[in-house]
Amino acid sequence: MECNQEDNREKCNCTYEPCSRKGICCECISYHLRLRELPACLFPKDAEATFDRSFEYFSRLVQKGKI
């Protein structure tokens, strides 16, 4: 399978610079799962800006109806 890195980069809402995984979704997901986190693309813009990518934070956002 070919990676569509350029297309993925256009849709990536991650504001962390300098992330070497931008547009390489398989690497991004693997990285965050190892840390018990989710990638930025699963969070709304304001939540992504906190850089808290934890499962627990995601769960709280779901419970509040923000996701």
Image (cartoon, grey):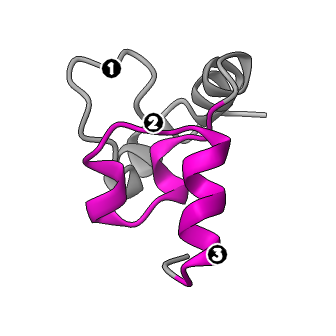
Q: What residue is disc 3 on?
A: 63
- The x and y percentages for residue 62 are 62, 72
Judge the density around disc 2: few (<14), some (14-19), many (≥20) Cα neighbours within 10 Å.
many
Judge the density around disc 1: few (<14), some (14-19), many (≥20) Cα neighbours within 10 Å.
few
Which is nearer the eye, 18 or 57?
57
Check the image and name the residue furthest to the right: 1
In the displayed structure, would residue 20 be above or below residue 23?
A: above
As helix, strand or loop, the secondary structure at mark 3 comes to: helix
The answer to whether residue 39 is magenta is yes
The reply, left or right, for residue 57 in relation to residue 40 is right
The reply, left or right, for residue 40 in relation to residue 56 is left
Which is nearer the eye, 3 or 52?
52
Q: What residue is disc 2 on?
A: 23
- The residue depicted at 54 percent of the width and 29 percent of the height is 24
User: Label for residue 19?
Assistant: 1
Instruction: Look at label 3 and name its amino acid.
Output: Gln
- The residue depicted at 33 percent of the width and 20 percent of the height is 19
Location of residue 9 by image quarter: top left
As helix, strand or loop, the secondary structure at mark 1 comes to: loop
Instruction: Look at label 2 and name its amino acid.
Output: Gly
The answer to whether residue 47 is magenta is yes
In the displayed structure, would residue 50 be above or below residue 66?
A: above
